Amino acid sequence: MPHTTEDAVLILVDIQQRLLPSIADGDAMVREALRLAQIARLLDVPVIGTEQNPAALGPNLPELKALCHTTLAKHHFDACRDGLVAALPPGRRHAIVAGSEAHVCVLQTAFGLQAAGLDVTVVIDAIGSRTDRNRQAAVARLAAAGITCASVEMVAFEWLETCRHPRFREVLALIR
């Protein structure tokens, strides 16, 4: 179901420097998450980051953290258990989720957001795990639970709605 920029919030889960070397095709995941966050900022969609145990695992990548309106430190794999739902801007009922690891923190956070009554979309080209098998298993489980799986471009064009959007050309430049 398409959603608008007015009801959306982007959540970047645990894209931390110390975790990335172990993520399969991590560079591609980061590239897509960065593109998604840049599009969100262009279209005034709030961006929230989470960091898993940052004292031990370090912060999110600086270029992604700079695009976040706020960053939530957490210890639970489901960021909702550490205050994510309370951190969401009022009126934002569609959570777009990207990050790592797909089969742990992304999966559990998506389930937590769904249980809190939000519509959830996981951006499958902007999530990663240590193995592709775990990433694929996460996507299958999310879809089976009724969570929408989409790509960066699908989300971007749903947010734009029309080629007459005032930011269309800027977003298109990021997509190409």
Image (spheres, grey):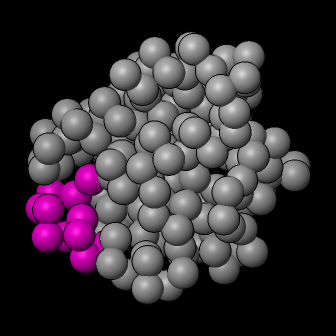
Q: Is residue 166 above or below residue 68?
A: above
Is residue 28 found left or right of 40 in the rendered image?
left
Residue reaching furthest to the front: 163
Q: Position of residue 70 (x, y in %)?
A: 64, 34
Residue drawn at x 22%, y 58% as measured from the top left: 129
Q: Position of residue 74 (x, y in %)?
A: 51, 54
Q: Position of residue 148 (x, y in %)?
A: 52, 68
Does 55 appear in magenta? no
Residue 44 figure quarter? top right
Residue drawn at x 36%, y 28% as measured from the top left: 61
Q: Using the image as rendered, state which of residue 71 and residue 175 is in the foreground.
A: 175
Q: Using the image as rendered, state which of residue 72 and residue 122 is in the foreground.
A: 122
Is residue 89 found left or right of 131 in the rendered image?
right
Is residue 15 found left or right of 160 in the rendered image?
left
Does 134 appear in magenta? yes
Residue drawn at x 40%, y 37% as measured from the top left: 33
Q: What's the magenta region?
A: 128-138
Q: Is residue 124 in view from this perspective?
A: yes
Task: Give the quadrant of the C terminus.
Answer: top left
Q: Position of residue 97 (x, y in %)?
A: 51, 53
Q: Main secondary structure of the magenta part?
A: helix
Residue reaching furthest to the bottom: 144
Task: Give the quadrant of the N terminus.
Answer: bottom right
Q: Is residue 99 in view from this perspective?
A: no
Q: Is residue 18 above or below residue 135?
A: above
How many badges with numbers are in the image? 0
Residue drawn at x 44%, y 77% as measured from the top left: 143
